[in-house]
Image (cartoon, rainbow, N blue to C red):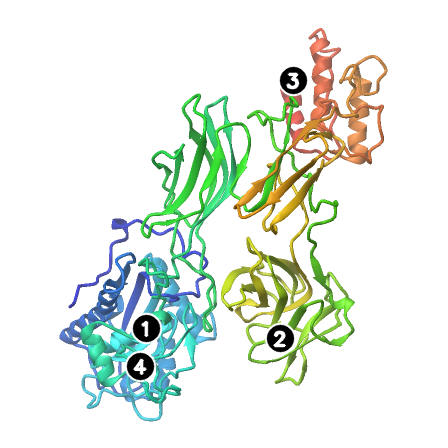
Amino acid sequence: MRRKLRLEKLEERALMASLPFGATAEDTGEFMLGRIAVTPVFIESSGALDTSTEDWTAAQKLDVLNKIEDGLDWWQQLLATKTDKHTLDFVLDRTFADTPFLSKYEPINRPSNDYALWVDEFLSDRGFQSSGFLETNMREFNHSQRLKLQADWSFTIFVVNSQNDGEGTFATGGSFNRAFSFAGGLFEVVPSTRPTSTFSHETGHMFWARDEYIGGGNYFQRRGYYNAQNTNALDLNPDPLFVQADSIMSEGTSLSRAFEQITTSNATLAQIGWVDSDGDGIFDVLDVPLSLNGVGRMDTLRSEYIFQGDARAQALPNLNSAGKQNNITLNRVGRLEYRINQGAWTVLSSPNEYTVSLNMRIPVPQGVQGTIEIRAVEPQLGILSNVFQGALDGAWSTTETAGVYGFAWNDLNSDGVWQSIETGVAGATVYLENNAGEPLRTQSVIRPGDLPPGQIINPISGVTVSAIGMDADGRVGVFEDSDAVLDTRTFRPYSWQGQGFRETFRGTDLQLKVAFARPTNYVFVHTIAAQNNAIARIDAFNSSGEIIGRAQTATMTLGQSQGIEIESLDDTIAYVVVYGHQETFIKIDQVRYGLNAQVVTDANGAYQFPAVDPGQVRVRIVPPSSAYAITSPSNGIQTLTVGAQAGLRADFGFLSVVSPWQNQRQREDVNNDGSIDLFDVLVAINEINRNGARTLTDGDVLPPPFFDIDGNRILEALDVLIVINYINAQGSGEGESRVMLVDFDAPTDSDLLLGKKQRSDRA
């Protein structure tokens, strides 16, 4: 059975760039796939405190190492019976097996609970004692081993010598007689005389598998990435006719048969992450498409297609009832590919990163018309991203094509055709309306200040608000709170332990559930940190109770507030649950839901309404300022019929209007006195010093003076430089008539450029 495992030389393999995507240093064993660092630590008693009764020999060490390797190899063989898509590699650091750690304790002669003494002794000796908590220090050690061995996960196996102990058991009085584990990438403790199958069994715990024998885990317990139920457990099994499947997580004959036949229960497989719901050979935890986001357009002058955006791995929501519940994946963006007019896919780059910022220039044969497609690929599992499709003309295209979407662009020649020299217009407001010009759908807001203080009486306009979790009894109230940001009150859950309304929602014990009478596609929740390092998270569920999305805030300091939002491409969000991630404390002072009927174009001129009900709709656009007039269509309104298609596009052409702050007779004549001289320079400089460089808006006083020398509706140092250069170009070159530059009170980047020019001229 055994395939030798060994410590690999790092230079012989491609070094990993980072932890698994979404994982922290504390996530050392979330699902059993990928590359796993294993550190066996053999304990050797020194006799300094306890009498030494056990001494490692070379033969004993080799025997135990072989059992460890065989026990780990069993999982690799089991994986091969389930799929040929995934890899599972264990790499051992034999440092503390070849040279056992010298301890003043003799572990096998002590109760099992004394593990804390000699495990802490080992960690302190290795320099991992920054925390007063053994688990924290242990995870720090495991993480260091993960980095050392360039692995995805890491755990430790402490082996205590029991060769001379008659029964190979710990002293009475402890919680365990023989082997035991602390689950989720922490450590195993195994007497040296235990069989190979023990190491297989305990390694299952490292990735959240529960015991299934009597006195172990029970039928109703859950754990693992999918929070899978322990349905093969004997304890509390409600079926009186239940027959347990052979399982490595059981004991006795059931475990022995499972080990020999290389099989285990479906419950065990689910808890370690091995579930393939669609039968494609890829386990659900990694069967998640990559994400490709961005915009692109054809640069006809250079015969290149430009795509800007990002590609990234996406993680399945982590439903584990234990651990840190971080969303984690091993998938990477292995390749970026493109094809023209449905031709063969061509590899553009092979980044092999979790996230990639894209500024791609793809060569296109001159004169070729049609379409280009771009995608991201995870090559090991064959997982793809969504496919971007763009036209080989001057118009922008986007990956966000659901619902109603489009662009606003600067139609320089007013021909209604987007040429490659024409750019998008940011800041335009787009409205989604019915035929009567009314908002098609609007968002609804639940504000605590709009409700009577005290316990909430449900429903609220068809929405039911409740508290869920181990400490909740369903009740939610609203109360005055000086920490509120968008309101004067916050929502508060009722605690059955505290017999009253708590000021905060706490981890998974006290969560806010918001259920909608009719499923929606968008939910926004405003949260406030009630402690340092708080993280607010929102999970969205469909009407079947399946999680369909997750989002969370960044780490917040005490009192800091952030909104979190989540949306689906159609109305499938039946309810959301909001809570403090990683057992942190948060407050909530607003909930908003429904389709937004008003959006603003982004830097590329793009907009999107991601979910629109079937029927006839109007899309109306308003320019960002009086600097633009609408050219296509002239009334700024497009009428669309929404049906079953993936998305409908509506673009709008604008024409940049002449800046009213630019002198059309002679742009350098700032004060409009008919001559261009130092007074024009000083007028512009004084305005910047007095009111600052800025974008000129309808609120600015109309000229004269004409401050917008270059006509871009921005007053900046560059405008002054244009006048200076004009005057200098008209001078004799002898120096007397040339302009000496004047420093600004508050220099901008452009001012610094002027300073460089000044030094150059004076030299």
At which x and y percent is residue 348? Answer: 38, 36
Q: Nearer the viewer, residue 331 or 243?
A: 243
Tag 4 residue: 104
Reading the image, the residue beneath label 1 is 266
Picture quadrant of residue 216:
bottom left
N-terminal label among 2 and 4: 4
C-alpha span from label 3 to label 2: 71 Å
Q: Who's the residue at 24% across and 67% down the image?
A: 78
Residue at left offset 70%, top offset 27%: 656
User: Which mark's residue is nearer the viewer, 3 or 1?
Assistant: 1
> Tag 4, which secondary structure?
loop
| Marks 4, 1: nearer the viewer | 1
The disc at residue 467 is: 2
Viewer-nearest residue: 644 or 670: 644
Mark toward the start of the polypeptide (3 vs 4): 4
Q: Which residue, given by chain and number where applicable, does mark 3 sit on?
A: 761
The 10 Å Cα crowd at callout 3, few under 14, some 14 to 19, many 20 or more, is: few
Q: Amino acid at mark 1?
A: Asn
Q: Residue 745: horizontal and vertical position, in percent?
A: 76, 33
10 Å crowding of disc 1: few (<14), some (14-19), many (20+): some
Amino acid at circle 3: Asp
